[in-house]
Every structure is written in structure tokens, then in C-alpha cells.
């Protein structure tokens, strides 16, 4: 003959369930911060790739002899309007440097991360 389960055997299980819930609730804010930082890093990498592409296209255009105002407009249309552009063109080579400050969309008060890309092309005669 078997005896029915007693209440003392089920009490430790319910106590451990509550501690797991408390630990999860304590970890959730930290997990959200890590997720936000990862999303910000992904955004910075995407802007970096935009800057690389814009610098390459601008260096080719400037090396072909296009006016520097058009080259500047090309960079701004390929990246962001607030992009900072440095250009140098001499008879041998053309160099373009593009930099953009990236801020997370959910925290405009946070410090910006500056991403920079540069490209060089041989100046055509």
C-alpha cells in the first residue's frame, strides 16, 4: 500500500520557482542594455559601409575630373547629410575622406561614435 504524497515534498519546488522568476526579473534590464548596445554596434557598422562606398565612388568621380561640388553632393547622397568630407586632388592622386558621427536613435544624449572611411584614386590626365 502506498501513501499519498505529502505537502512537504512539494514546498521546495514552489520556492525554487519563485527564485527563478526573481533572477529572470533581475537579469532582464541587463539583457536589454546588451541588446541595445548590439543594435547600436550594428548601426555603426552599416554607416561605416556606407562611408566606404561613398568614399570610393567620390574618389573615382574626383579623379575623373568632376567638379568638387558635384563630388561633395555625391557623398552626401550616398551617406548622410551631416557627413564631413575632406578632399585633396593633385596631379598624381585624389584622396577622399568621409566621416559621420553615429548616435543611437533611442539615446540622443549618449556620446556619438565617429566612423571614418577614406579612398584614394589615381588622378586621370
Image (tube, rainbow, N blue to C red):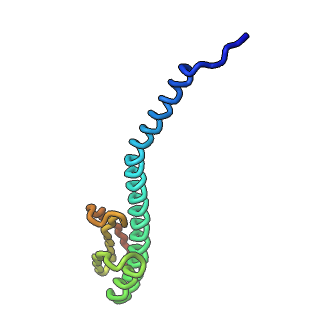
- Residue 2 occupies quadrant: top right
Name the residue located 29 percent from the left edge and 78 percent from the top edge.
87
The C terminus sits in image quarter: bottom left
- Residue 4 occupies quadrant: top right
Q: Can the viewer see residue 57 in this picture?
A: yes
Q: Position of residue 43 (x, y in %)?
A: 41, 63
Name the residue located 37 percent from the left edge and 82 percent from the top edge.
62
Q: Can the viewer see residue 63 in this picture?
A: no
Name the residue located 37 percent from the left edge and 70 percent from the top edge.
119
Front in this rendered view, residue 105 or 69: 105
Q: Position of residue 24 (x, y in %)?
A: 45, 41
Front in this rendered view, residue 41 or 60: 41
Front in this rendered view, residue 11 or 31: 11
The N terminus sits in image quarter: top right
Residue 54 lies, with reference to residue 107, above or below; the image says below
Q: Residue furthest right?
A: 1
- Is 72 positioned to the left or the right of 57 in the image? left
Name the residue located 39 percent from the left edge and 59 percent from the top edge.
40
Q: Position of residue 78 (x, y in %)?
A: 42, 78
Q: Position of residue 124 (x, y in %)?
A: 39, 82
Residue 9 lies, with reference to residue 97, above or below; the image says above
Front in this rendered view, residue 21 or 116: 21
Amino acid at each position: 500500500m502506498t501513501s499519498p504524497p505529502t505537502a512537504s515534498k512539494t514546498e521546495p519546488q514552489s520556492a525554487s520557482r519563485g527564485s527563478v522568476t526573481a533572477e529572470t526579473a533581475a537579469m532582464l534590464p541587463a539583457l536589454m542594455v546588451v541588446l541595445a548596445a548590439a543594435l547600436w554596434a550594428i548601426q555603426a557598422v552599416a554607416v561605416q559601409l556606407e562611408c566606404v562606398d561613398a568614399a570610393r565612388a567620390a574618389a573615382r568621380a574626383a579623379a575623373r575630373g568632376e567638379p568638387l561640388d558635384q563630388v561633395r553632393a555625391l557623398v552626401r547622397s550616398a551617406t548622410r547629410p551631416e557627413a564631413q568630407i575632406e578632399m585633396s586632388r593633385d596631379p598624381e592622386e585624389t584622396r577622399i575622406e568621409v566621416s559621420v558621427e553615429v548616435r543611437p536613435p533611442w539615446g540622443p544624449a549618449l556620446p556619438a561614435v565617429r566612423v571614418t572611411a577614406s579612398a584614394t584614386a589615381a588622378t586621370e590626365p
